[in-house]
Image: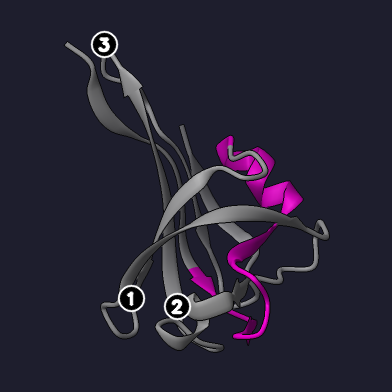
Amino acid sequence: MLRQVLKSKIHRAIITDASVEYEGSIEIPTDLMEDVGLCEGEKVLVASITTGNRLETYVQPGAAHEGRFVMNGGAAHLIGKGERVSIMAFGLSHEPILAQKVVLNERNEVARQEG
């Protein structure tokens, strides 16, 4: 049986900007995408730690080492600038897997890495 399991997680990121006019997605720095194994266009679940809002969107790569997380499109109505979020991606697997996770600090830098 295939199970849907967590494969990637960026925890405690702070949304640095939000643009309702953009067509959609969440922009994530490429260095952090690589740290957790996310790829461009991959579907992610974004959960606001601040408000509890949750939504699905896709990943758009952003500049590395700048710490910018940008919520775009209609999703920016649900999760806005200054909110703290967890970004999660899931995969199908026959066996349990060890998810790649990072926990970020106040400057959206890696404070702790797991997996």
| Residue shown at 59% from the left, 63% from the top | 25
Q: Position of residue 86 (x, y in %)?
A: 41, 62
Residue type at tag 1: Ile
Is 1 on the left-hand or right-hand side of 17?
Answer: left
- As measured in the structure, the alpha-carbon distance from the residue carrying label 1 to the one carrying label 3 is 30 Å
Residue matched to label 2: 84
Residue matched to label 3: 94
Residue range (magenta):
13-37
Rendered view: 36 above or below 95: below
Residue type at tag 3: His
What's the colour scheme?
one colour
Residue type at tag 2: Arg
- As measured in the structure, the alpha-carbon distance from the residue carrying label 3 to the one carrying label 2 is 32 Å
Residue matched to label 1: 49
Report if the CB atoms under discs 1 and 2 are less than 8 Å apart.
yes
Residue 36 counted in the magenta span? yes
